[in-house]
Amino acid sequence: MTAHPRLRLGVNIDHVATIRNARGGSHPDPVRAAELAVMAGADGITAHLREDRRHISDTDIARLISLIPIPINLEMAATEEMLEIALRHKPHAACIVPERREERTTEGGLDAAGQHNHLAPFVRQLKEAGIRVSLFIEPDLKQVEAAQTLGAPVVELHTGAYCEAAQAGDISRCDQLLRRFNRAAHAAAARELEVHAGHGLSYDTVGPIARHPFIVELNIGHFIVGEAIFVGLDAAIRGMRHRMDEARREGNANA
C-alpha cells in the first residue's frame, strides 16, 4: 500500500448546468466553469451525464473533452446508451454510478456485489477502450471486494452518509461512519485499488476524509458551485484545495 502525499481535486460542474437549464439558453456555461476550475488548480473535471439530461448535456460532454486540457471524468449509469457515449468520446475516466430518475442526486453507492453479472461487461468494454474505470460504492468491505473481482482499477467511496451525520451534528454517528470509511479505504488500498471519495463534502467535512493517506482523489461539486455564488468559483475551489492540503499535511505528520 502506498500513501499519497498530494490529494487530487476533481471539480464536478453539473450544477452550473442545473442553473443554466432552469431557464434555458446557454448561460451559465459549464464548460466556462471547467476552464475557470483549471485556472484555480483543479486536477480534473467531473460531469454526470444523466439519462434524463437534467443538467449536463451531450453537447457539454463533447465540448469538455474537446476543450479542457485536464482529465475528464464521466459519471454514468450502467446502460447501453451511456456505454455507447463513453466509447465514442473516450473520456480519461468513467465512474459507474447508480441512477434512479426520481432521485434528486445520487442517493448511495452502486451494488457491485449484487450486480456483478450486469456490471462486468461495462467494466470490461470501458477498460478495453483505454478508459480508467471506477465504481462508486459504499465504504463497505463486501463492495470493495466485489469491485476488485470485477476488475475495476478504481473505487470511489460514497461519503454522503458521513456528511449528513456531520450536518446534523451527530458526533457519535460521524465517528462510526468515519471508522467504516477508513476500514474500506485501507481494504481497497490493500487490494491495490486506487481509492477516491466524494458526495456531499464541504469545507466543514472534507478534513477527516482528506487526512486519510490512501485517498488519491476527491470529487466535489455541489458545495463548490453553491459557495461560488457568494465568493466566486476561483475562491471556492482554492478554499477547498487549501483545506484538503492542510488536512493531508496533518495526516502525514501524524502517520
Image (tube, rainbow, N blue to C red):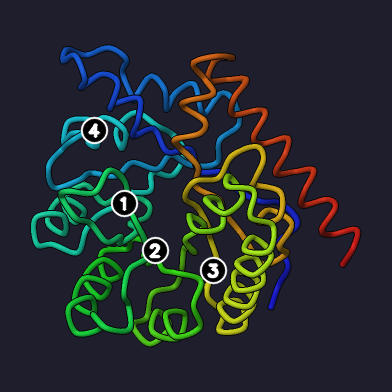
Identify residue type, mark 3: Glu
N-terminal-most mark, 4 or 2: 4
Name which residue lies at 32% across and 63% down: 130
Q: Which mark lies nearer to you, 2 or 1? A: 2
Q: Residue at x 38, y 87 (%)?
A: 149
Report the residue marked by disc 4.
55
Q: Are marks 2 and 1 in contact (CB under 8 Å)?
A: yes
Callout 1–callout 4 Cβ contact below 8 Å: no
**Which residue was labeled with disc 1?**
75
Q: Nearer the viewer, residue 196 or 137?
A: 137
Q: Where does the C terminus fall, quadrant-wise?
A: bottom right
Q: Secondary structure at mark 1?
A: strand
Q: CA distance from mark 2 to mark 3?
A: 12 Å
Task: Determine whether the residue tagged by mark 2 lies in a helix, strand or loop.
Answer: strand
Quadrant of residue 18 in the image?
A: top left
- Picture layout, residue 125 above or below residue 50: below
Q: Amino acid at mark 4?
A: His
Q: Residues within 10 Å of mark 3 (few under 14, many from 20)?
A: many
Cα–Cα gap, marks 1 and 4: 12 Å
